[in-house]
Amino acid sequence: MHTDFPALEPVRGVIFDLHATLVDQGHAGEWVDRALARQPNELSAVERSHLEFFLDRIWETARIQDPQSSRDLSFADHRRVFHELLAAGPAVPTDFAEALYEVLLDTWHAYADTVPTLRTLKNAGIRIGVLSNIGVPIRPVLDREGISEWIDAVVLSYEIGVVKPDPGIFEAALLALELPAHNTLMVGDSGRDDTGGIALGIRTLILPRTKGPVHGLDAVTRMLAVPSSADSARR
């Protein structure tokens, strides 16, 4: 039996997750170095190795210890969960643990393909949003990494009191972009958190966390058949 499916509506807006999608959390060694510069502490080579291993995976660990993402609903909860995770793992002195938290965002940098991808989409007339489960003030990072100038809306869990994958936070992003679900694509790294908009009809692309400076965000422009600046120059 042949069934005619309705044609797909064009994508007029893309909602991006932030951490591990547009921004990489950086190398744990740099994180430790920055904390040591703020609060000197004696770490043996073994202790440092264990700490770096733990920090590199701390937010994956948080998904297990804090499955309801309470850390992303307020600054206080985020700080609390971080210190609970560290205390349960490679315990370090309180003052050094605090230093690690204070420099948390200093090593977060945009992937090399983040701004070029956002620029390409923006130049094609596509609206761009950032939707993040986050419990820290992330807007300074967006400014520092040159992301802010390319986006039309930012929806953060701690500001609206809802976390992904609750469809409510995706509805807030659609409202901020002034677009319906069927004209919107969600791009994230989590098969759990970033798929909550599917129930609303948002098409979703999952790009799992990668190592290195390039995240593979050109998959978005290729998926939408949006020519890059280099492609346009060759024509």
Image: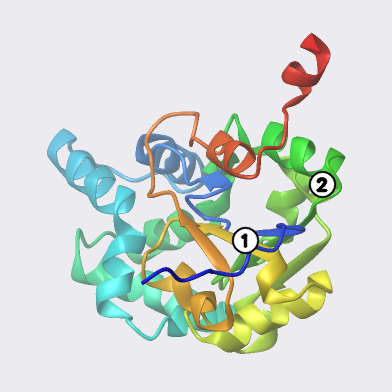
Q: Residue at x 51, y 62 (%)?
A: 204
Q: Is residue 156 above or below residue 47?
A: below
**Residue for badge 1:** 185
Residue 150 is tagged as 2
Q: Is residue 79 left or right of residue 85?
A: right
Q: Residue at x 58, y 47 (%)?
A: 22
Q: Earlier in the sequence, mark 2 or mark 1?
A: 2
Element class at badge 1: strand
Q: Residue 135, percent across and down? A: 56, 73
Residue 177 is tagged as none
Q: Is residue 84 left or right of residue 161?
A: left
Q: Residue at x 47, y 50 (%)?
A: 20
Residue type indicated by callout 2? Trp
Q: Is residue 114 left or right of residue 188?
A: right
Residue at the extreme left of the image, as rendered: 46
Q: Residues within 10 Å of mark 1 (few under 14, many from 20)?
A: many
Q: Quadrant of the C terminus?
A: top right
Distance from Cα at disc 2 to Cα at disc 1: 16 Å
